[in-house]
Structure formats: C-alpha cells, structure tokens
Image: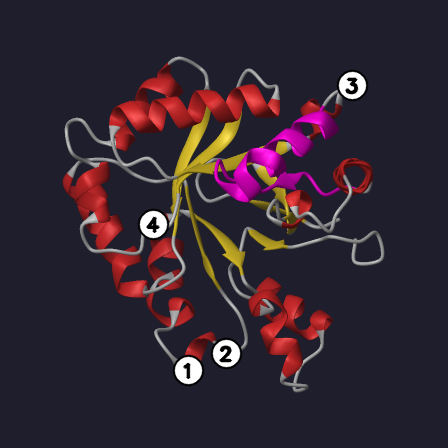
C-alpha cells in the first residue's frame, strides 16, 4: 500500500480509503461488511470513512464491530456529523463514539457543506465547531475537517469563514473525478487552495457512484488512477464485495 501524509498533520494515511456508506447497505450482509474492513486493514489500507447518518447508523455499527479485537489500533478512523448547533453536534458525536465502540475518532468532519449559510451556522458562538473544538480538547477527536458535494465556491467560502474565526481545518473531502473539470470544478478551484494551506485532500466520487462507468468511456481503474494522480492524501471508494477490495 502507498501511504501519503495528511496535510500538515504528519499522519500517514493509505492512498485508498474504505467508504463507509456501502458497508451498511441492505444488500451487504453484516458479516461481509466486517470482513471487508478487516481484510482492508490486514492488507494495508488504514483510512476508514463513515458518517453519523449513513444507513441510519448501521454503517457505524458494522464498522465498530470490525474494529474490535485490536483492529482499532491499525485504523485512521473518520466519521462525519450533520448537526449545525453545538448541542446537536455534541449529541451526534457521542452517538458515533458509542456506535463505533471507540474512545476517540481520528478525524471528524462537518458533513454536507452545501449552502452559503452553513459556514456561519457552524462557526456561530453556539455552532457545531465549538462542540468539535471541545471534543478535541477532551481527547474524543484528534482532527477536524468538512465535506461537500455540490459547489466548489461554498468550499472556498467555508475556508474563508474559518480563517475569519482563526480556525484551520485539517482535511477537506470533495468530489474528484475525470469529469470534474467540465463543471463547477473542485479540482481547479479548491484543490490548489488546500495544497497551499497544507490541508489534507480527501477525494471521493471518483466513479460518481458508478455513473461514470455507464458512459463506457473509462474503467474503474482509470477512474481511481485519475484521482490518485491529483494531490490527494486519500481517495475514498465504496467497497461492497471482496472482489472490489
């Protein structure tokens, strides 16, 4: 496995990360989900993606089962929260800790920053970032980031509002794929800023949930290679079968 440095954190993370969404799907048996995570960790993948809202918590519960029996020590564990207020963010974070069965999470990200008012809600005096800062001080969280799927301008605005509040994110998750350059390009607009600020780049949607493959113009391997050749720390990809792993 190739390892890369996560921004300015100094953490070594696997170039490929296991996406958490697929692990909780009804079409994936729990035993298989656990096997995928443990096999990935056994073979050198250490970056695990998840979210408080994935499959109504099933994704976190299954990943938590996979992390038992000393597997936690091998993983760089990431999850996301949707709460925008300090109270709701703290509640979701504690629920994620319980589901995952861990004392701390390596990286927690504000999920789905897709509206221009999201940054202001998060950095409000009673906003969600306050909860993560307190959790970090308490040892429940090591690093803080954010994600978004829709518009690169909102990513840039989130970085701007963070700077105004004297806060620097450790990682940012964004869609990066072969079609990205043609419309609202995260690659062109956001990635250079993240590199300049030494913020870890977490690529996702390298195959656009399989939609790009239906075009018959690219293969899965080409999609992954494209995203891996950008300045990404990790390319997160959905894995719902051992053959894909």
Query: Would you say the residues marked 1 and 2 are in contact, meaning their CB atoms lie under 8 Å apart?
Result: yes
Residue under the image location 36 percent in, 63 percent down: 150
**Residue 141 picture location, percent across and down:** 45, 24
Which of pointers 1 and 4 lies earlier in the amino acid sequence?
A: 1
Pointer 2 local density, CA inside 10 Å: few below 14, some 14–19, many at least 20: few
**Residue 33 picture location, percent across and down:** 75, 41
Circle 4 is placed at which residue position? 197
Mark 4 or mark 3: which is in front?
3
Circle 1 is placed at which residue position? 182
Circle 2 is placed at which residue position? 179
**Residue 111 picture location, percent across and down:** 39, 45
Pointer 3 local density, CA inside 10 Å: few below 14, some 14–19, many at least 20: few
The CA distance from mark 1 to mark 2 is 6 Å
**SS at badge 3:** loop
Which of pointers 1 and 3 lies earlier in the amino acid sequence?
A: 3
Query: Would you say the residues marked 4 and 3 are in contact, meaning their CB atoms lie under 8 Å apart?
Result: no
Query: Would you say the residues marked 4 and 2 are in contact, meaning their CB atoms lie under 8 Å apart?
Result: no
Residue under the image location 25 percent in, 31 percent down: 85
> Which of the 4 image quadrants contains residue 138?
top left
**SS at badge 2:** loop
**Residue 6 picture location, percent across and down:** 51, 43
Pointer 4 local density, CA inside 10 Å: few below 14, some 14–19, many at least 20: some
Q: Is residue 164 visible?
A: yes
Residue under the image location 54 percent in, 76 percent down: 178
> Which of the 4 image quadrants contains residue 102?
top right
The CA distance from mark 3 to mark 2 is 41 Å
Asked if residue 69 lies left or right of residue 57, the reply is right
Pointer 1 local density, CA inside 10 Å: few below 14, some 14–19, many at least 20: few
The residue segment tinted magenta is 44-67
């Amino acid at each position: 496995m190739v390892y890369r440095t996560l921004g300015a954190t100094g953490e070594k993370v696997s170039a490929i990360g296991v996406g958490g969404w697929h692990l909780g799907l009804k079409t994936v048996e729990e035993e298989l989900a656990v096997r995928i995570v443990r096999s990935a960790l056994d073979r050198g993948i250490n970056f695990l993606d998840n979210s408080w809202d994935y499959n109504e918590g099933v994704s976190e519960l299954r990943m938590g089962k996979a992390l038992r029996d000393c597997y936690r020590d091998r993983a760089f564990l990431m999850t996301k929260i949707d709460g925008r207020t300090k109270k709701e963010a703290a509640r979701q974070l504690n629920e994620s800790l319980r589901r995952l069965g861990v004392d701390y999470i390596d990286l927690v990200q504000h999920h789905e920053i897709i509206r221009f008012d999201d940054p202001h809600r998060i950095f409000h005096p009673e906003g969600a970032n306050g909860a993560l800062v307190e959790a970090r001080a308490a040892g429940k969280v090591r690093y803080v980031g954010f994600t978004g799927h829709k518009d690169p301008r909102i990513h840039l605005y989130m970085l701007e509002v963070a700077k105004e509040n004297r806060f620097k994110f450790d990682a940012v998750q964004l869609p990066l794929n072969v079609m990205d350059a043609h419309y609202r390009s995260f690659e062109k607009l956001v990635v250079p800023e993240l590199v300049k600020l030494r913020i870890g780049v977490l690529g996702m949607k390298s195959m656009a949930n399989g939609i790009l493959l239906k075009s018959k113009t690219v293969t899965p391997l080409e999609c992954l290679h494209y995203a891996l050749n950008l300045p990404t720390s990790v390319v997160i990809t959905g894995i719902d079968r051992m053959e894909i792993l």
